[in-house]
C-alpha cells in the first residue's frame, strides 16, 4: 500500500507521516481480523471496533493509556482518572433524556470506568467548558459523582 503513495509527495516529513498512518491502519486491521469472524468483517464493524477501542494494543504495564469506559472493560490499572464527569457528557444527555435502558447503560459504563483502578480512582469534571463557537459554558457535576460519594465504595 505504501507503494501507492504518489512520488509527487516530495516533502519527506509528510511522506513519513503518511507511511506511519498506513502502518497504524494496518495494525488495527490485523487486530480486527484476529478478533472478528470473516463473515462479520464489514467496513461498519471495523469502524465501530476502532471507535470502541477493540483494535487498540493495550500495555497496562507501562506509560499512560487514554481509554474510553468501553475500551477499559476487562483491564486494570494502578491509578485511574475518570474525566469529563459533567451532566450531559457523562452521563450523555441523550441517555438522560431517554432514561430507562439508556441510562442503565451509562451507569454500567461508569461502574466499569471507576472499577478499573487497583489503588486510586480520581473523578473529575471541568467547571467551565469552551464551546465550539467560542462561548464558555459553566458545567454541572455529573450525578455519578454524587452517587459515588454516597456509596460505600469510598
Image (spheres, rainbow, N blue to C red):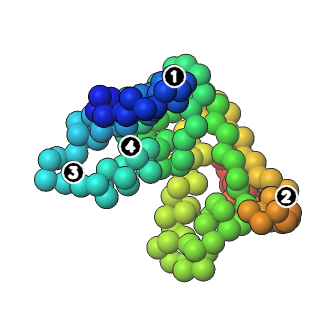
Using the numbered discs, state the Cα–Cα distance from disc 1 to disc 2 in whole angstroms: 41 Å
Residue 117 falls in which quadrant of the image? top right
Asked if 82 appears above or below 140 in the picture, the reply is: above
Question: Mark 2 sits on what residue?
Answer: 128
Q: Which of marks 4 and 3 is in front?
A: 3
Label 3 sits on a secondary structure element that is loop
Label 2 sits on a secondary structure element that is strand
Q: Of the numbered discs in the image, which one, if any, rests on residue 56?
A: none
Looking at the image, which is closer to me, 32 or 11? 11
Residue 125: % across, % down:
77, 52
Q: Which of marks 1 and 2 is nearer the N terminus?
A: 1
Question: Mark 4 sits on what residue?
Answer: 54
Question: Mark 3 sits on what residue?
Answer: 41
Q: Which residue lies furthest to the front in this view?
A: 8
Question: Can residue 139 be seen in the rendering of this structure?
Answer: no
Using the numbered discs, state the Cα–Cα distance from disc 1 to disc 4 in whole angstroms: 32 Å
Residue that appears at 64% across and 60% down? 90
Residue that appears at 44% across and 44% down? 53
Residue 83: % across, % down:
69, 47
Label 4 sits on a secondary structure element that is loop
Q: Nearer the viewer, mark 1 or mark 2?
A: 1
Q: Which of marks 1 and 4 is in front?
A: 1
On-image quarter of the N terminus: top left
Using the numbered discs, state the Cα–Cα distance from disc 1 to disc 3 in whole angstroms: 34 Å
Q: Earlier in the sequence, mark 1 or mark 4?
A: 1
Amino acid at each position: 500500500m505504501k507503494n501507492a503513495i504518489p512520488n509527487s509527495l516530495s516533502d519527506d516529513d509528510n511522506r513519513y507521516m503518511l507511511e506511519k498512518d498506513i502502518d497504524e491502519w494496518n495494525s488495527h486491521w490485523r487486530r480486527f481480523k484476529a478478533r472478528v469472524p470473516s463473515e462479520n468483517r464489514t467496513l461498519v464493524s471495523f469502524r465501530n471496533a476502532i471507535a470502541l477501542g477493540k483494535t487498540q494494543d493495550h500495555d497496562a504495564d507501562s506509560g499512560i493509556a487514554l481509554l474510553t469506559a468501553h475500551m477499559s472493560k476487562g483491564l486494570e490499572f494502578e491509578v485511574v482518572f475518570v474525566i469529563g464527569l459533567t451532566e450531559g457528557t457523562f452521563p450523555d444527555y441523550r441517555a438522560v433524556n431517554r432514561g430507562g435502558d439508556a441510562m442503565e447503560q451509562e451507569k454500567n459504563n461508569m461502574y466499569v470506568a471507576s472499577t478499573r483502578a487497583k489503588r486510586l480512582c480520581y473523578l473529575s469534571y471541568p467547571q467551565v467548558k469552551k464551546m465550539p463557537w467560542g462561548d464558555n459554558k459553566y458545567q454541572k457535576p455529573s450525578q455519578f459523582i454524587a452517587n459515588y460519594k454516597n456509596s460505600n465504595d469510598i
